[in-house]
Image (tube, helix red, strand yellow):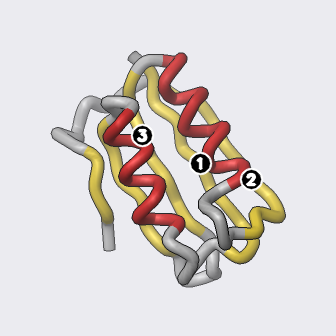
C-alpha cells in the first residue's frame, strides 16, 4: 500500500473533475479525498496499491472531457490509513 498526493492545475474546476476523480478512484478501489482549492486547482489524496495509484495519476494528467490540465505535481508517501472510502472533502 502507498499514498499519493496530486495537485492538478489548469481549467479543472467546474468541469466535473472531482466527480470523475471520485468515480475513477472508487473503480480502482482506492481510499482518499478530492477537493477544489481556493487557487483554482484540484487536490487529490489517495491510498491503495502502487499500480492503482499509477492509474489514478494517469487519469489526473488528462482529466475528464472538458478539463484542460496545464500542470500537475505529485508525490508518493507512506500510507496513513485514515480513509474508509473515497469522497469529496470541503
C-beta proximity under 8 Å, tags 2 and 1? yes
In the image, 26: left or right of 58?
A: left
Question: How many dots with numbers?
Answer: 3
At numbered mark 1, what does the secondary structure look like: helix, strand or loop? Answer: strand
Is 2 situated left or right of 85 in this image?
A: right
- Residue 80: percent from left, percent from top: 32, 31
Return the mark for residue 60.
none
Q: Earlier in the sequence, mark 3 or mark 2?
A: 3
Query: In the image, residue 39 lies at what x, y percent?
Result: 63, 81
Label placed on residue 72: 2
Inter-mark Cα distance, 3 to 2: 15 Å
Residue bearing the label numbered 3: 46
Up-down: is 35 above or below 34? Answer: below
Per the image, label 2 sits on a secondary structure element best described as strand
Q: Report the residue that reaches farthest toward the right.
A: 70
Identity of the residue drawn at 49% across and 53% down: 44
In primary-sequence order, the first of circles 2 and 1 is 1
Q: CA distance from mark 2 to mark 1?
A: 7 Å
Which secondary structure, mark 3? strand
In contact (CB < 8 Å): disc 1 and disc 3: yes
Screen quadrant of the C terminus: bottom left
Quadrant of the frame with the N terminus: top left
Question: Which is more toward the observer, 83 or 18?
Answer: 18
Q: Which mark is residue 6?
A: 1
Amino acid at each position: 500500500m502507498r499514498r499519493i498526493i496530486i495537485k492538478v492545475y489548469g481549467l479543472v474546476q467546474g468541469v466535473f473533475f472531482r466527480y470523475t476523480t471520485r468515480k475513477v478512484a472508487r473503480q480502482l478501489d482506492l481510499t482518499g479525498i478530492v477537493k477544489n482549492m481556493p487557487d483554482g486547482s484540484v487536490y487529490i489524496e489517495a491510498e491503495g496499491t502502487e499500480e492503482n495509484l499509477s492509474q489514478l495519476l494517469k487519469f489526473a494528467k488528462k482529466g475528464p472531457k472538458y478539463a484542460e490540465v496545464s500542470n500537475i505535481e505529485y508525490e508518493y508517501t507512506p500510507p496513513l490509513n485514515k480513509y474508509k472510502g473515497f469522497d469529496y472533502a470541503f
